[in-house]
Image (tube, grey):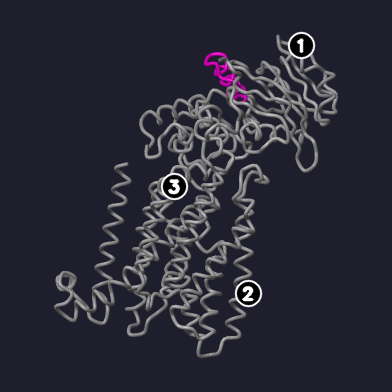
C-alpha cells in the first residue's frame, strides 16, 4: 500500500514536471520563474496570454488523451487477456477514422470531423458489441468457457475491414485534402483545445474501473476461475469494454489515432511494477498522460515552426522501446 | 439443518444435441471424497461446470448447501465452493504468492488489500502442495506440474466447504499425485470438507475416494460407495475396455487388459 502510494506520487511528480516543460517550451521560451508569474497572473503579460490561452489547453488535452489511451490499453489487455492488446485492437480507431475522413472528404469543418470521428467510433463499438454479444452475455453460453480469443478475432477482422475503407477513401480523396487526412490518421494535437471532455472522461473511467481492480486481477486468470472466486464475469467484461471504448473514442475524437501510448505504457508499467490492476490503472493514466505530453512538446518544438503529428513521435519512440522490452525479458512479455 | 454440501437432482446435461448425462441424482455430504470416472467426452467437465454455475443444466437442479445454485450471490457462493479448472491462463507474469492469494478474493472487502493473514494462509497452502519457498517465483518460470500445484494452493487458500476439481492430478508426478490426494482426504476427514474430483487413474480413485460416480457413454451414471461402483463389469461397460480387479498389498488395483 505504501509502495503503491509512492509509485503514484512519483508519477504525479513526473506529470507536473512534464507540464512545466510543456508550458515553458515553444517559440517564446520561458524560464520557470516567468512561467510561474505567467500562470499566477495571466492577464499581465504576453507570456501569460501564450501560456494560458495556447499552451495550457493543448498540454491538458495531450495529458488527458495520453491518460485515456494508456488506461484503455491497460483495460483491453485485461479484457482480452493478451499483453499485446491496445485500445485500437477491436477496430475502434478504424471506425473513428472512417467517420473523420468522411467528414473531411465532404469538406466539412473541424466540428463535423470530430463528430464524424465520435460517430464512427460509436458505430465500431456497437458493431463489435453486436457481433460478439454472446461473449458479453451470461456465462452459460461461453462456448469453450473462454470468450477472449473469439472477441479478439472479431475485433481484428473489424479493424481489417475499416482499414480497407480508409484506404479506399485515401485513394479517392483529392490531393488538397490528403495532407490533413494523413495528419489525422497519425494522430495530431494541433488545434486540440477541447481538453475538458477528455479530462472528465479520464476521471470518470478511473472512478468506474478502479473499484473493480482486484476483480480484474482475478479475471486475468480465466473466466471459469474468476466465476468460481465470486466475480460476476459477464457484467464486469461489459463494463470494461464500454469504459475502454468510450475512453478510446474520446481520445481519438480529440486527437486522432495516436498509436503506441496505449500499448507501450501499460506494458512497460506491468514489467516494472507487477501486474496488480489496483496499482496499474492509476499509474497507466498518469504515465500515459505524461508520455504524450512530452511527445507533443517534442512534436511542436523539434522542427519548429514545422509541426509534426505527435503520432509520429510516439511511434518512433514506442517501436524501439517496445522491442527493447520484448527482448529484455524473454518469455515474460 | 444438515443439508448436503452438494445435491444434484434429476440432472440432464446435453451438449450439441448429444445427451451426456441423464437422471443423475446424488448427495455429497461433509467428509466425503467423490471421484468422477468416465471415458473422454462422457461429460465429466460439463458436469463440473454445471455444478459450479458456469452453465445451466438442460433439466434438473443443483443445490449448494440446500439452496438452489442460482439463488447464491456470487461472492457468497465463492465462500461455499471452490473450483479447480482443467486449464489455467497465465499469459502475464505474476508471483506465486500473488497467484495463491487470489484464492482469498471472496473474503476481502472491495477496498481491502491482502495483508499478513492472507500471506500466511497462502504460504500454508503452498506448503500443502510442496511448494514452500516458491512465494516470489514468477509463475511463468514454473513447469506445468508446478503451475497446477500453484492453482491447487489457490483453491486450498479459498478454504471453501465444497471443493470441485477437474483433473487435479493430471500434470503431477507420482509423488505429488499422492501428496495432493492425501491432502484432499485429510481436508475431508479432518475438517469436514466435501470433495469431488475427476480422474483417469482408476488406482488413485480406488485408493483415495470414498464414493464414485461412473459416467457411461450412454448417459447413465452409476454411483455409490467406491467398492460398489468400481466393479470389473461396470468399468468395462463404461470404458469399453476390459479391466481386471486384483487385491494386492492390501489395496484394490485395476489392470487394463
Element at label 3? loop
In this rendering, is residue B250 above or below B118? above
Comes first in the chain, label 3 or label 2: 2
Marker disc for residue B247: 1
Instruction: Report how far apart the C-alphas of labels 2 and 1 lie in the structure.
Output: 70 Å
Instruction: Tell me the crowding category of disc 2: few under 14, some 14 to 19, or many 20 or more residues within 10 angstroms, Cα based.
Output: few
Instruction: Report how far apart the C-alphas of labels 3 and 1 lie in the structure.
Output: 51 Å
Q: Is residue A39 left or right of residue A100?
A: left
Q: Position of residue A291 (x, y in %)?
A: 36, 64
Marker disc for residue A164: 2
Instruction: Give me the residue at 47% from left, 52% from top.
Output: A329
Q: Which chain does the numbered disc 1 sit on? A: B
Marker disc for residue A275: 3
Q: Main secondary structure of the magenta part?
A: helix
Q: Hey, which quadrant is residue B241 in on the image? A: top right
Element at label 1? strand
Amino acid at each position: 500500500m505504501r509502495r503503491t502510494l509512492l509509485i503514484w506520487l512519483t508519477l504525479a511528480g513526473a506529470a507536473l514536471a512534464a507540464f512545466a516543460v510543456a508550458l515553458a517550451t515553444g517559440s517564446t521560451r520561458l524560464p520557470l520563474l516567468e512561467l510561474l508569474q505567467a500562470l499566477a497572473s495571466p492577464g499581465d503579460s504576453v507570456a501569460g496570454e501564450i501560456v494560458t490561452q495556447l499552451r495550457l489547453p493543448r498540454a491538458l488535452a495531450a495529458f488527458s488523451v495520453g491518460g485515456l489511451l494508456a488506461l484503455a490499453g491497460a483495460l483491453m489487455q485485461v479484457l482480452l487477456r493478451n499483453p499485446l492488446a491496445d485500445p485500437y485492437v477491436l477496430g475502434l480507431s478504424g471506425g473513428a477514422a472512417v467517420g473523420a475522413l468522411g467528414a473531411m472528404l465532404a469538406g466539412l469543418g473541424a466540428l463535423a470531423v470530430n463528430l464524424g470521428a465520435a460517430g464512427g467510433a460509436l458505430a465500431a463499438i456497437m458493431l463489435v458489441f453486436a457481433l460478439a454479444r454472446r461473449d458479453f452475455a451470461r456465462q452459460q453460453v461461453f462456448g469453450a468457457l473462454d470468450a477472449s480469443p473469439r472477441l479478439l478475432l472479431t475485433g481484428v477482422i473489424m479493424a481489417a475491414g475499416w482499414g480497407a475503407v480508409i484506404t479506399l477513401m485515401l485513394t479517392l480523396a483529392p490531393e488538397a485534402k490528403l495532407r490533413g487526412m494523413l495528419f489525422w490518421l497519425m494522430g495530431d494535437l494541433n488545434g486540440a483545445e477541447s481538453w475538458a471532455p477528455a479530462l472528465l472522461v479520464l476521471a470518470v473511467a478511473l472512478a468506474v474501473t478502479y473499484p473493480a481492480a482486484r476483480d480484474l486481477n482475478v479475471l486475468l486468470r480465466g473466466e471459469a476461475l474468476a466465476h468460481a472466486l465470486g466475480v460476476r464475469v459477464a457484467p464486469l467484461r461489459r463494463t470494461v469494454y464500454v469504459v475502454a471504448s468510450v475512453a478510446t473514442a474520446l481520445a481519438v475524437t480529440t486527437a486522432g489515432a495516436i498509436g503506441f501510448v496505449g500499448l507501450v505504457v501499460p506494458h512497460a508499467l506491468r514489467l516494472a511494477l507487477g501486474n496488480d490492476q489496483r496499482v496499474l490503472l492509476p499509474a497507466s493514466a498518469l504515465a500515459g498522460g505524461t508520455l504524450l505530453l512530452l511527445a507533443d512538446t517534442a512534436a511542436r518544438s523539434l522542427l519548429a515552426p514545422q509541426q509534426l503529428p505527435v503520432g509520429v513521435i510516439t511511434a518512433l519512440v514506442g517501436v524501439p522501446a517496445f522491442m527493447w522490452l520484448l527482448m529484455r525479458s524473454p518469455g515474460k512479455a | 439443518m444438515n443439508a448436503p454440501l452438494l445435491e444434484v437432482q434429476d440432472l440432464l446435461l446435453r451438449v450439441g444435441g448429444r445427451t451426456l448425462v441423464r437422471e443423475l441424482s446424488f448427495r455429497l455430504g461433509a467428509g466425503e471424497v467423490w471421484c468422477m470416472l468416465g471415458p473422454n467426452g462422457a461429460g465429466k467437465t460439463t458436469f463440473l461446470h454445471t455444478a459450479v454455475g458456469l452453465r445451466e443444466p438442460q433439466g434438473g437442479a443443483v443445490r449448494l448447501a440446500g439452496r438452489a445454485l442460482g439463488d447464491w450471490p456470487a461472492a457468497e457462493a465463492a465462500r461455499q465452493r471452490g473450483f479447480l479448472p482443467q486449464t489455467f491462463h497465465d499469459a502475464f507474469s505474476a508471483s506465486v504468492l500473488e497467484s495463491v492469494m487470489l484464492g482469498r478474493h471472496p473474503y476481502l472487502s472491495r477496498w481491502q488489500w491482502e495483508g499478513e493473514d492472507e500471506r500466511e494462509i497462502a504460504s500454508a497452502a503452498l506448503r500443502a502442495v510442496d511448494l514452500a519457498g516458491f512465494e516470489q517465483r514468477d509463475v511463468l518460470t514454473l513447469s506445468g506440474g508446478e503451475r497446477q500445484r500453484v492453482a491447487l494452493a489457490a483453491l486450498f487458500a479459498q478454504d471453501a466447504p465444497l471443493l470441485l476439481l477437474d483433473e487435479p492430478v493430471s500434470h503431477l508426478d507420482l509423488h505429488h499425485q499422492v501428496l495432493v490426494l492425501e491432502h484432499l482426504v485429510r481436508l475431508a476427514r479432518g475438517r469436514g470438507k466435501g470433495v469431488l474430483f475427476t480422474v483417469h487413474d482408476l488406482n488413485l480413485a480406488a485408493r483415495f475416494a470414498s464414493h464414485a460416480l461412473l459416467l457411461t457413454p450412454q448417459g447413465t451414471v452409476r454411483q455409490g460407495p467406491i467398492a460398489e461402483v468400481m466393479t470389473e463389469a461396470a468399468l468395462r461397460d463404461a470404458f469399453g475396455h476390459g479391466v481386471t480387479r486384483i487385491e494386492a498389498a492390501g489395496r484394490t488395483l485395476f489392470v487394463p487388459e
